[in-house]
Image (cartoon, helix red, strand yellow):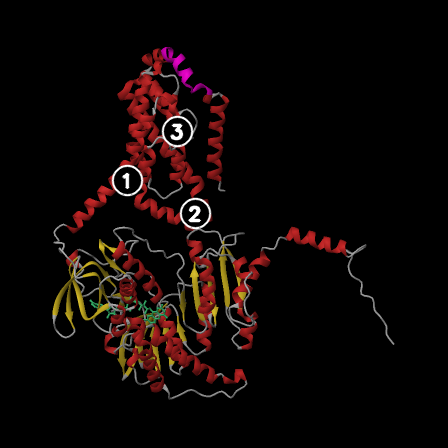
């Protein structure tokens, strides 16, 4: 604990000590107040200014330090200053005191709580940011909640002091008035319990409902205002209209059809979207071929003769297209029609929050209405406005798959997951790859140790990684394509044959007419969704890459569930999207798989954590396959069996991660993984060994020492002495 906190605690302890030492708690009683009312009143008449100031100061101290006696002080306010001045003095002093108590609690406790319970505190903060004022008003209006507890509890949240003070002041007024008014009749009060009758408590409870009713009314008015100017159709063609037939749109439509809603899916290009046609599927097919090439090139690792890999690019790309064709039926219009979805080939844009205009691919245009609409239009590769780049006919993940000839020298812009996966694959297939990244490391969202391991592997596989290089210009110099980069104040020249741009993705919102229904995109191009995936209007939703923040197929599918269910049943119950356990994998070799917090994120959130590491070089299966490199890293709170995050870097990392993901999702700790039988020799045994490392580090040393002694004692006399080996001569 730092010195200023200690000093504050000391000051509080001294004031409380003085208060109790001088029997402050015994002085502030109803009997005392009644018996001294006349004499105190006389003194106040002669020293009004001093009396008001002193009274307010004592009131502030009593409430700020949560000392007993606030009720008596309030009665005194009425008794000595009357209804109006008493109410003014009490309400101002109590608000100042409550705000000080709130600040003290925040200063002393909030950091510690955030460190220990970062996730819970962050969740609480989100709730407070949204509805904190309503909660506080309810708590203040119902006098059964002790005020000092409210001060302390709210201080631990992220509520702004201004909001706290203002809401407290307003919401405490009714209660304060009742007590101040009672104070004006001090002589007739037998006990403080008389002041609030059962009827009065009931009226306060009803008053406490007021903020909730107000919230409902505000919500209702806000919705009315949102929809003002739009003519709601008398009936709808569909229950749900879905724009976009990628991962997010397909899942939304699937769910709607499964619960027998009438649903249409509008796709302007190819069903399956990016994942099937230009993303996950082709990239993983290419990566598999690259891995096979690497195995052939290094066949000597397995006791075979190494084979140089060349000249198969056309076949490889044909295989990639074959793989897409094989997966295609899963996402085909035929399959979805059979499931009950109307599949429409066309482009859709908004006419109103319930109506879309669909420009069919065959040239027709029609308007369709639905009670709810889901926007699932995905994203596309961003091409930065670097001078000369467009003249280089850059490759992106969109057009890469039509490539016929293998680039001899490939320049990859971007060190994120997509750039890294493709750079590595092309290098393993035999291209001379230069990978340029503006930042200090590859895969910057992962921890430094992860980036370092990947960098080493890339370099070993011949990728020329240029970190801290910013491409600033592209030119053709003497018939050769050249990228100029800025690197630590110098200009660096990089010649290449083809450039692949993988520097991020932008959301597809053009043509949707979002502006027409008053929806603006965020600065990063995605649309602003609420926790229920709704988009400005409670009946318009977005999911997948167009909504962010994750750009994964499984994230799109996860969000799609919320969009579809809230779209169909939101009038009865709305579900808030839950991102707590979101895994992802980058399919480099070795793979990088992560779920939950990284070390850097835990540090940034001020969370205390421990790291448990297990090296895959120790795993029998990895050794048997000559793939004994990489590690598992698990983050847990100090001394607690709870997984905060896990990263696996190695072969089959994506599969190994599944065990940690399941454990996190269902609140299972490392003890449970350790106690589970894992078949030998499997890659997943590594999860168990990582759990074993954690267990070893948390072995109960004291008990083990006692056990050692017990075993010595059980060996008999002298059992705890060091063992002397006795040689036996034979023959
Ligand atoms: C190279 C690469 C590799 C990837 N690898 C992985 C991976 O291994 N694992 C993973 O989880 N994710 C991966 N991703 C990300 C993944 O592909 C996306 O997160 C996922 O496809 C998003 O799905 P979506 O439905 O939001 O969008 P999309 O799949 O882009 O679908 C949107 C659809 O909407 C259509 N559309 C757009 N506008 C309109 C309109 N106005 N009217 C009608 N239709 C419209 C588009 O034509 C498109 O078909 C990868 C991405 C890339 C580029």
Q: Does residue 373 appear to the left or right of 247 in the view shown?
A: left
Q: Secondary structure at mark 3?
A: helix
- CB under 8 Å between callouts 2 and 3? no
Q: Residues within 10 Å of mark 3 (few under 14, many from 20)?
A: many
Whether residue 368 is visible, yes or no, is yes
What x and y, as percent, mark residue 13? 49, 30
Q: Is residue 38 magenta?
A: yes
Residue 212 disc label? 1
Residue 63 disc label? 3
Closest to the observer: 725 or 460?
A: 725
Query: Ligand 1 near label 1 (Cβ, under 8 Å)?
Result: no
Q: Nearer the viewer, mark 2 or mark 1?
A: 1
Q: Label 1, label 3: how many angstroms apart (C-alpha)?
A: 27 Å
Residue drawn at point x = 41 percent, y = 67 percent:
585
Return the residue at label 2.
Answer: 114
Quick check: 566 above or below 45?
below
Quick check: 401 above or below 305?
above
Q: Secondary structure at mark 2?
A: helix
Q: Main secondary structure of the magenta part?
A: helix
What x and y, as percent, mark residue 336? 27, 70
Residue drawn at point x = 50 percent, y = 84 percent:
299
Q: Nearer the viewer, mark 1 or mark 3?
A: 1
Q: Secondary structure at mark 1?
A: helix
In this figure, what is the number of numbered marks? 3
Span shown in magenta: 26-39
């Amino acid at each position: 604990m730092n010195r200023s906190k200690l000093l504050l605690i000391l000051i509080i302890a001294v004031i409380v000590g003085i208060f109790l030492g001088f029997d402050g708690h015994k002085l502030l009683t109803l009997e005392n107040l009644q018996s001294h009312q006349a004499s105190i009143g006389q003194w106040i008449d002669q020293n009004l200014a001093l009396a008001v100031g002193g009274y307010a100061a004592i009131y502030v101290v009593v409430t700020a330090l949560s000392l007993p006696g606030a009720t008596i002080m309030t009665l005194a306010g009425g008794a000595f200053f009357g209804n109006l001045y008493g109410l003014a003095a009490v309400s101002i002093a109590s608000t100042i005191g409550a705000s000080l108590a709130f600040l003290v609690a925040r200063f002393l406790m909030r950091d510690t709580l955030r460190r220990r319970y970062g996730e819970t505190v962050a969740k609480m903060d989100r709730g407070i940011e949204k509805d904190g004022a309503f909660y506080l008003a309810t708590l203040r209006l119902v006098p059964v909640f002790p005020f000092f507890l409210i001060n302390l509890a709210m201080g631990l949240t992220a509520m702004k002091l201004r909001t706290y003070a203002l809401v407290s002041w307003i919401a405490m007024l009714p209660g304060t008035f009742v007590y101040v008014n009672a104070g004006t009749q001090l002589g007739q009060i037998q006990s403080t319990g008389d002041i609030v009758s059962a009827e009065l408590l009931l009226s306060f409870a009803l008053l406490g409902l007021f903020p909730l009713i107000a919230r409902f009314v505000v919500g209702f008015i806000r919705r009315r205002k949102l929809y003002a100017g739009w003519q709601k159709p008398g009936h709808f063609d569909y229950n749900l209209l879905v724009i976009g037939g990628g991962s997010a749109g397909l899942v939304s439509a699937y769910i709607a059809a499964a619960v027998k809603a009438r649903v249409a899916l509008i796709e302007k290009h190819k069903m399956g979207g990016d994942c099937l046609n230009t993303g996950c599927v082709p990239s993983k097919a290419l990566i598999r071929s690259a891995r096979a090439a690497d195995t052939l090139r290094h066949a000597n690792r397995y006791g075979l003769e190494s084979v140089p890999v060349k000249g198969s690019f056309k076949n490889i790309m044909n295989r990639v297209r074959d793989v897409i064709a094989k997966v295609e039926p899963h996402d085909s219009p035929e399959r979805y029609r059979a499931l009950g979805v109307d599949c429409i080939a066309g482009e859709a844009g908004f006419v109103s929050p319930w109506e879309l205009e669909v420009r069919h691919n065959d040239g027709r245009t029609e308007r369709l209405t639905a009670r709810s609409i889901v926007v699932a239009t995905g994203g596309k590769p961003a091409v930065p406005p670097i001078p000369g780049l467009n003249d280089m006919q850059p490759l992106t993940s969109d057009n890469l798959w039509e490539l016929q000839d293998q680039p001899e020298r490939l320049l990859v812009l971007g060190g994120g997951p997509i750039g890294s996966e493709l750079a590595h694959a092309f290098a393993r297939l035999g291209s001379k790859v230069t990978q340029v990244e503006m930042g200090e490391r590859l895969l910057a969202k992962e921890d430094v140790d992860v980036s370092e391991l990947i960098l080493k592997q890339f370099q070993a596989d011949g990728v020329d990684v240029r970190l801290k290089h910013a491409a600033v210009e592209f030119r053709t110099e003497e018939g050769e394509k050249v990228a100029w980069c800025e690197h630590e104040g110098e200009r660096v020249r990089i010649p290449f044959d083809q450039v692949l741009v993988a520097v991020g993705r932008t959301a597809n919102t053009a043509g949707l007419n979002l502006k027409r229904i008053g929806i603006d995109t965020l600065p990063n191009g995605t649309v602003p969704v609420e926790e229920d995936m709704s988009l400005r209007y409670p009946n318009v939703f977005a999911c997948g890459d167009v909504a962010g923040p994750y750009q994964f197929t499984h994230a799109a599918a996860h969000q799609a569930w919320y969009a579809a269910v809230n779209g169909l049943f939101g009038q009865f119950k709305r579900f808030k999207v839950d991102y707590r356990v979101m895994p992802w994998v980058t399919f480099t070799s070795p793979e990088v798989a992560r779920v939950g917090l990284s070390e850097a994120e835990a540090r940034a959130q001020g969370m205390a954590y421990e790291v448990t590491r297990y090296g895959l070089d120790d795993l029998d299966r990895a050794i048997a396959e000559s793939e004994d490199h990489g590690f598992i890293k698990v983050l847990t709170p100090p001394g607690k069996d709870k997984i905060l995050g896990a990263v696996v870097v190695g072969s089959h990392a994506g599969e190994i991660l599944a065990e940690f993901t399941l454990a996190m999702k269902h609140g299972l700790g490392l003890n449970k993984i350790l106690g589970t039988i894992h078949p030998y020799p499997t890659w997943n045994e590594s999860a168990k060994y990582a759990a074993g490392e954690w267990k070893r580090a948390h072995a109960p040393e004291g008990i083990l020492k006692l056990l050692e002694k017990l075993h010595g004692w059980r060996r008999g006399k002298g059992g705890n002495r060091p063992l002397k080996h006795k040689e036996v001569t034979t023959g």
